[in-house]
Image (cartoon, helix red, strand yellow):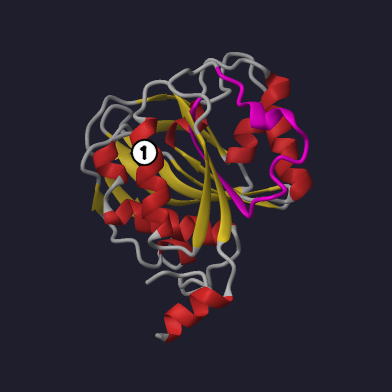
Amino acid sequence: MSSTAIEAQSAPPLRVLLVTGGGYHDYPVQKDILSKGISERVNAGFTIDHEAGAKSDVKVSRHTTSGWARNFDVVIYNICFADVRDNEWSEAIVREHVTTGVPAVVLHCTMHSYNFRGHSPIWSMFLGVRTQRHQRQMPYTVEVLEPKHPIMANFPGPWKTPQGELYEILDVYPTATPLAHAFGEESKRNQPTIWTNRFAGVRVFGTTIGHHNETMQTSTYLDLLGAGVLWAANKLDDAGKPLAGYGKR
């Protein structure tokens, strides 16, 4: 048995909760792309909550019970609940992460979820950025801003996405650190695309990349998410390598 295999057996798999669903995206396929792709890179076991299906106004029942995050090491959100307009609801999700200390990975339309005129800023502050719109769909080139950050250590920059939907970032909160950006052909300015955030002691990794399946299933994207999950769970060393027992390659 190889040393890598022995290490993998010695560390318990990260307990990952993937909350997914909502409108405007192919979440039935993406849940499998993400769980399979990340599991091939990270010693992790997945619980998938796709209760919402294709509805964008669903309040996931898991989130109604205090302590729902305690059995997980990291929560991944790949959601589009743009029609949930309830500040108490989104603030309660943030409060759960702060209370339990469980980190989060937030993808694409998660940044547009619970985001409406008059919405509480707490959700966006937890994510690390605020955005309310995106540009038309077209590929864009991601350029690395922080090549020495562990998450970006193996990222091939610049990287042109196969397809894309670039989000316009209106605010980057002081607790967030942009790791990469892309130039917006419509906005004529660079838009952050990858970042980390530390909200009230909770680690959050975020990226707006990922609308299209063809982008999400690339090795570049899945390698990025694997690194992001490990960083969020504090299982990534300063050189961008998984801590012993948490890598799969």
As drawn, is 210 to the left or to the right of 207?
A: left
Residue 79 as seen in the image, left or right of residue 85: left
Would residue 141 appear left or right of 22 to someone viewing this image? left
Residue stretch rendered in magenta on the structure: 58-80
What element does badge 1 sit on? helix
Residue 98 falls within the magenta-colored stretch: no
Count the marks: 1
User: Residue 177 location, x and y as percent?
Assistant: 54, 51
Residue 85 in the image: state x and y as whole percent.
61, 15
Whether the magenta-drawn stretch holds residue 68 is answered as: yes
| Amino acid type, residue under disc 1 in the picture | Gln
Q: Quadrant of residue 216?
A: top left
Residue 20 spot, x, y in % from top left:
49, 34
State the residue in front, 230 or 68. Answer: 68
Which corner quadrant of the image does residue 219 belong to? bottom left
Q: Which residue corresponds to the image point at 32% horizontal and 26% vertical from the top-left? A: 135
The residue shown at (46%, 63%) is: 42
Instruction: Identify the residue position indicated by label 1 in the image.
Output: 30
Q: Is residue 13 visible?
A: yes
Residue drawn where x is 75% and y is 48% of the image: 100
**At 36% from the left edge and 59% from the top edge, which residue is drawn?**
223
